Every structure is written in C-alpha cells, then in structure tokens.
Amino acid sequence: MKFLLVYPSWPKLEHQTPFTLPPHGPIVMAAAIPSWVDVTFVDENVDEIPFDGGWDFVGLSMMLTSQQPRGFAIAQEFMSRGIKVIAGGISVMLHADEVQKHVDSVFYGEAEGRLEEVFNDFTNGKLRSRYDYSLNFPDTELIGPARRLILDHDKYAYKGVRMVDLFHASRGCRFNCYPCCTGYLGGRTFRPRPMHRVAEELATIDNDKLFVVDNSLAQDKVWEIELFKTMAPFKKHWCCHPIQDDDEVLAAAVDAGAWYVYQGVDDTSDFIRNRINRYHQYGIGVEGTIILGTDEQTEDDIKRLVEFLLEVKLDLAEFTIMTPFAHTKIREQMEREGRMLTYDPGMYTADKVVFQPKHMSAERLQELYHWAWDQFYDDEPQTYKMYKLHKKI
C-alpha cells in the first residue's frame, strides 16, 4: 500500500524569522504505522505535494487551526481523484466535527497501538468515518522513536544552519493554564516516557541540537533530574519549555546541555524578573513568549511590559495575540460574553485579533502587536539576537 502523509503549509507569524522546523506530530504518528505500509511524507512548507503519485491512501497531519483551509483544499484535490483521505493531529482533535465535513475519516487521540486497525479497515474497504481514542491514552512504554527517516533534513536549514530536531519525553500536563488547550488534548495527568525509551530515541538522532517540546519540564523534580541525567551522555544542546527553579535541577540541566528556555512572561513582577535572572545565572538563555491582549492588560501595561523585557535582557522575544482556541476556558469566556469576532480558521494564526479586547479596540491591539515586535528588536534585529544565542553553542 502506498500511503502519502501530508503536512499542510501554514503562515508564520508576520514578524518571525522565516525558518522552518521539522514537524514532530507526523513523525511520531508515522512510527505507529504498520511496517507493511509504504509511507511517503511531504511537508508542504518545504516541498510540493505529488498529487499524481499513484497513492492508495492519503493522511493529513494538522497541528494548527490555521492549517485547516489549506488542508481542506488538499483533501478535496485527492478525494476528487477517488483517493480516501484521513486526517489527524491536534487541530483535528480541536475541530473534529468541522474537519469531518471535508475528509473521509478523522482520527483523534494518540496513535500508538491504534493504526493497525485503521489500515486494516482501509484495506478491507471498511474505513470508519471516525476513530476516537481521545479519552484512552496508550501506555507510554509503547512510544518508541519517532520515524525521522521520512524527513528530508536538508530542507530544514536557515542560512546554512541545520534547524533543531524535535523530541518529547512526556505527555499530558498537570497544569491548567487559562488560555491553553493542552489539558483537553493530552489530559491533566503528567505521563512520562520510561527513561530507556527516552535514551533509545536520543540514540537515533544525529542532530546535536534539539527542541524538547514537552509542555513543561517543571512537572516533577525527581523525574526532571533523572531526565537530564539520561540526556547528558548524548551531548546535545537543547531548548525547551520551563525548567523548575531549583539549584539541583538547573545544574543538572546545564550538565545535560540546556541551551535556552521558552519562558512565558505575562507581567513585570519580581517573580518573572528573578526567574529570568536565575536562568541567566546558570548560562541558560531565555526566549520570552509574550501574549498580548489579556483582560488584565491596558495599552499602558503592554508598553510597560515591552520596556521590562528590555530591562531584564531577554535573549529573544516572541509576541503573540491572545487567541481563544477551541476547548479552552478563554474561548468559553469570550463566547459567554459575546466577544468573539470571527471563527475563520485562517485568522487563528496568533498574530491577528479574533476577539473584542476588554480595554481597547481590536484595531488598537493589532497596532500594539506590531509595535511590540518593532520596539523590542529596534536596537538589534531578531536575526542578530538569534545569531548571538546560537553562538553560545
């Protein structure tokens, strides 16, 4: 069977440096596909889709809401040729009913141990319209190495520098952050992979730079230290989401190759200032992830926040506009208060205002978003700040 797995193109943030990372979801899913299936992967962000490849079956892997319009067009092209299309991924889980209108079948939930059934059903002409495993998480022992051989790594480089490979050591998240849909997608229980599985996958990665994409590493101190000790012999440089603010944890992270951390910065408190200082004391860079447009923020608050980011010497900053994605508390609030402006998935790129802000017009928040990027990178362009951070390793 010739199976084509497609990752639809999607627009980057308007001010973001236009590099492309190798996707993670498709290669994790592909590892669970039965060995008797011949898999070809195409990331439309770096390559063209071979519509005339004589495919038996096509899969769409969609992580982002903003991938949906292009994903639906791709599905229609294949379906018009009589080829069955199945869709899965985070975006499908968040919008399963809508996605199902545009494809033959949807799959949501985690893939390990489940895809044999899907491909057998297809082979026997009994493909179901929906495969729902969203409330039935597989044993993390089943999560083996992602199928990176389906990627063309040469296409994931920026100015001659190979991009990081993506890797995960756990699923689920015990936190319940207000604008986040992770609890809906992966559950509120922290589910670590066994360390021998972590080591097994790290041994398959030939890249010395990694992005550990777990929602947060600061879930369990004992596990965190064990993870870093497991990672250390592989001598990788890696970035991640938050690390626990603990001397033993931070020291172990540095020994394991911690490079920089994505740290949410939502206020100008001493807590945030100290958090950033602590990372810097250990030689760990910080890329601030800053959401603009929360109900707590006035125009003056946003301006003060950008000043604060420069004061604390963030290595990089990524600004987004608060976006009420499906299955989040913020979406429920915005709908309850009648503040949703659009449900157009093409607008859900996190750089467009899709709701009515509390303290300003939608137009003014959009202007402040552009101003924040310009202001933070006024003295040093984003590309130069990226160069300095990369130079550390």
Image: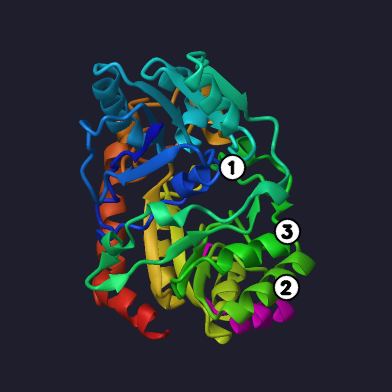
Distance CA(mark 1)–CA(mark 2) = 23 Å
28 on left or right of 387: right
| The stretch drawn in magenta includes residue 196 | no
Distance CA(mark 3)–CA(mark 1) = 21 Å
Q: Earlier in the sequence, mark 2 or mark 3?
A: 3
Tag 1 secondary structure: helix
Q: Residues within 10 Å of mark 1 (few under 14, many from 20)?
A: many
Q: Residues within 10 Å of mark 3 (few under 14, many from 20)?
A: some
Q: Is residue 229 above or below residue 85?
A: below
Q: Nearer the viewer, mark 1 or mark 2?
A: 2
Tell me where the magenta segment starts and ends, as one range.
Answer: 245-265
197 on left or right of 88: right
Is disc 2 in contact with disc 3, using a CB cutoff of under 8 Å? no
Quadrant containing the C terminus in the rendered view? bottom left
Residue at the far right in the pictured view: 222
Q: Is residue 245 visible?
A: no
| The stretch drawn in magenta includes residue 255 | yes
Coloured how?
rainbow
Q: Which residue is mark 3?
A: 194
Q: Residues within 10 Å of mark 2 (few under 14, many from 20)?
A: many
The percent position of residue 62, horizontal first and vertical second, equals 41, 37
The front one of 178 and 383 is 383
The front one of 234 and 4 is 4
Tag 2 secondary structure: helix
Q: Earlier in the sequence, mark 3 or mark 1?
A: 1
The percent position of residue 120, horizontal first and vertical second, equals 55, 24
Q: Which residue is mark 2?
A: 225
Q: Earlier in the sequence, mark 1 or mark 2?
A: 1
Q: Which residue is mark 1?
A: 182
Identified by mark 3, the residue type is: Pro
Is disc 3 in contact with disc 1, using a CB cutoff of under 8 Å? no
